[in-house]
Image: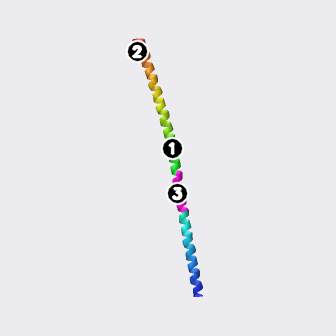
């Protein structure tokens, strides 16, 4: 009976350790999933920022071209 009780305790300890290990593994997987999501969101935000930056650069180029055209017209009219 004493041997059977010790065997049972050993089995319980083994199961408890297995459960802890699985829980830790699940927590690690959850953390990895959260981190992957953060990376994905960061990359999307970076893409949006780059797109907006390029749009602003194009707008600046267009404004500079328009400014040059206006300056040329002013020189012609006052020249």
Q: How crowded is mark 3: few (under 14 residues within 10 Å), some or many (20 or more)?
A: few
Q: Which mark is residue 57?
A: none
Residue drawn at 48 percent across, 30 percent down: 59
Residue drawn at 45 percent across, 29 percent down: 60
Q: Residue 45 carries which label?
A: 1
Residue linked to disc 3 = 32
Residue contact between numbered discs 1 and 3, judged by CB atoms under 8 Å: no
The image shows residue 77 at horizontal and vertical percentages of 42, 12
Mark-to-mark CA distance, 1 and 2: 45 Å
Q: Quadrant of residue 11?
A: bottom right
Q: Is residue 42 above or below residue 71?
A: below
Task: Provide the secondary structure element on which disc 2 rests.
Answer: helix
Q: Which of marks 1 and 2 is nearer the N terminus?
A: 1
Q: Quadrant of the N terminus?
A: bottom right
Q: Which of marks 3 and 2 is nearer the N terminus?
A: 3
Q: Earlier in the sequence, mark 1 or mark 3?
A: 3
Q: Does the stretch in magenta take in 55?
A: no
Q: Does the stretch in magenta take in 36?
A: yes
Looking at the image, residue 79 sits to the left or right of residue 21; the answer is left
Looking at the image, residue 31 sits to the left or right of residue 68; the answer is right
Q: How is the image coloured?
A: rainbow
Number of callouts in the render?
Answer: 3
Mark-to-mark CA distance, 1 and 3: 20 Å
Q: Is residue 47 above or below residue 3?
A: above
Magenta segment, prevailing SS (helix, strand or loop)? helix
Q: Which mark is residue 75?
A: 2
The image shows residue 24 at horizontal and vertical percentages of 53, 65
Magenta region: which residues?
A: 26-37
Mark-to-mark CA distance, 3 and 2: 64 Å
Residue contact between numbered discs 1 and 2, judged by CB atoms under 8 Å: no
Task: Provide the secondary structure element on which disc 3 rests.
Answer: helix
């Amino acid at each position: 009976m004493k041997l059977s009780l010790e065997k049972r305790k050993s089995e319980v300890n083994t199961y408890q350790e297995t459960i802890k290990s699985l829980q830790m593994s699940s927590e690690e997987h959850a953390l990895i999933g959260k981190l992957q999501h953060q990376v994905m969101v960061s990359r999307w935000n970076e893409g949006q920022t780059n797109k907006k930056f390029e749009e602003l650069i194009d707008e600046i180029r267009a404004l500079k071209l328009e400014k040059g055209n206006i300056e040329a017209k002013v020189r012609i009219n006052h020249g």
